Image: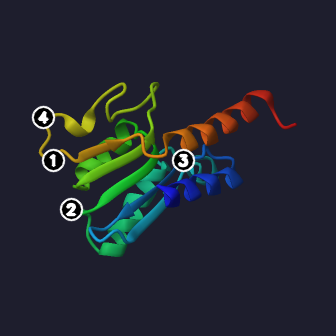
């Protein structure tokens, strides 16, 4: 999670919401890193999870990421939860819950939907306070403007 938090902090430089993600292989080595790039790339799909999953798939040379873990600083949205399912990751680990758009237990629960052919394990709340503090500071700054 610390590597994902580093990615989240790096997103601040481009004005993006500070969300970061990493994909780890079964041995714990980082296969892919991602941070939000929606603002930087003008890309609505530029979520940290999608960026990290794409990087991991490129590193592995295939789209199936079985045996891998997606680690992200905020509960994935429906797009990102769906991408994790479709990539066949074994596990999704996230820090803070997202009550407004979370799709791994908060608003929806895409990854545990029994109708889907793959259901990753979920681990929630890892370093949640640190992730929440980073997000709160970002949004407070954007609401109040630069000081």
Give the secondary structure at mark 2: loop
Residue 2 drawn at (x, y percent): 51, 57
Q: Mark 3 or mark 2: name the one nearer the start of the chain.
A: 3
Residue drawn 79% across and 28% down? 144
In the rendered structure, find residue 19 and report the number of the disc placed on it: 3
Image-quadrant location for residue 17: top right
Residue drawn 36% across and 48% down? 93
Q: Name the residue under label 1.
A: 118
Front position in the image: 120 or 123: 123
Question: Do tag 2 and tag 4 residues touch (Cβ < 8 Å)?
Answer: no
Spatial distance from mark 3 to mark 2, Cα to Cα? 23 Å
Spatial distance from mark 1 to mark 2, Cα to Cα? 10 Å
Residue 27 drawn at (x, y percent): 29, 71
Question: Label 3: how many residues lie within 10 Å, few (<14), some (14-19) or many (20+)?
Answer: many
Image-quadrant location for residue 143: top right
Q: Mark 4 points at which residue?
A: 114
Residue drawn 49% across and 40% down? 128
Q: Name the residue under label 2.
A: 66
Residue 121 drawn at (x, y percent): 23, 46
Image-quadrant location for residue 104: top left
Question: Label 4: how many residues lie within 10 Å, few (<14), some (14-19) or many (20+)?
Answer: few
Give the secondary structure at mark 3: loop
Count of numbered circles on the image: 4
In the rendered structure, find residue 33 and report the number of the disc placed on it: none
Spatial distance from mark 3 to mark 1, Cα to Cα? 25 Å
Looking at the rendering, in which quadrant would you find the C terminus?
top right
């Amino acid at each position: 999670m610390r590597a994902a938090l580093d990615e989240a902090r790096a997103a601040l430089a481009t004005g993006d919401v500070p969300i970061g993600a990493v994909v780890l292989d079964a041995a714990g080595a980082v296969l892919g890193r991602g941070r939000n790039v929606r603002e930087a790339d003008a890309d609505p799909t530029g979520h940290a999870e999608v960026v990290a999953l794409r990087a991991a798939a490129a590193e592995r040379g295939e789209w199936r990421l079985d045996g891998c873990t997606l680690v992200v600083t905020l509960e994935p949205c429906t797009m990102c939860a769906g991408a994790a399912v479709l990539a066949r990751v074994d596990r999704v680990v996230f820090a803070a819950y997202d009550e407004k758009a979370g799709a791994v237990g908060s608003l929806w629960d895409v990854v545990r939907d029994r109708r889907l052919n793959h259901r990753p394990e979920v681990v929630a709340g890892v370093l949640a306070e640190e992730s929440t503090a980073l997000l709160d500071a970002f949004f407070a700054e954007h609401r109040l403007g630069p000081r």
